[in-house]
Image (cartoon, rainbow, N blue to C red):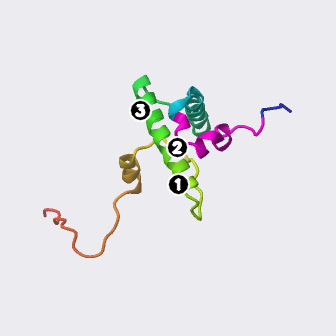
Amino acid sequence: MTCTGFPGPGLEHTAPHVLFNPMSEYINRRSADYIESSFEQFKKNHEHKYDSELEHRQRMKIFRQNVRYINTRNRAALPYKMKLNKFADRTDDELRVLRGRRYTKGYNGGLPFPK
């Protein structure tokens, strides 16, 4: 058995001060470190590897934005809580591609295939 610090690992426990004061991320370095360590844990948990340092930085930026969005929604006292998943480093356009084409009733302006 290995002892760890209270309250334990995980994004939801790493920096609770950010949940209460979103501006703290811009004021002190500890909040930026929390995002970096959370991103490293995220990559480890979901086995994400990036081809270049540039892609790594871009994915971390997207991850940071998604964490901010999740924290904002969770602070709003909605009847549900959001959590990170394996898509936290994806853009909206990438997620839209994964969802595929959505079916709509009626004419959608599409042309028939040539015969």
Residue tagged 2: 67
Left/right placement of residue 1 relative to residue 69 reads right
**Could you give the CA–CA distance between mark 2 and mark 3, rounded to whole angstroms?**
14 Å
Q: Residue at x 56, y 47 (%)?
A: 84
Q: Nearer the viewer, mark 1 or mark 3?
A: 1
**Lower sequence index among marks 2 and 1:** 2
Q: Residue at x 36, y 51 (%)?
A: 97
Residue 94, image x, y percentages = 38, 46
Q: Amino acid at mark 2?
A: Val
Dot 1: element:
helix
Residue 46, image x, y percentages = 58, 39
Residue tagged 3: 58
Up the image or down, 92 lies above or below 31; here it is below
Dot 3: element:
helix
Say which mark, if any, is on residue 64. none
Residue tagged 1: 73
Crowding at dot 2, Cα within 10 Å, few <14 / some 14-19 / many 20+, comes out as many
Tell me the magenta residue range: 6-25
**Could you give the CA–CA distance between mark 1 and mark 3, rounded to whole angstroms?**
23 Å
Mark 2–mark 3 CB contact (< 8 Å):
no
Left/right placement of residue 114 relative to residue 89 reads left
Residue 17, image x, y percentages = 63, 40
Q: Residue at x 48, y 33 (%)?
A: 60
**Lower sequence index among marks 1 and 3:** 3
| Residue closer to the observer: 114 or 62 | 62
Q: Nearer the viewer, mark 2 or mark 1?
A: 1
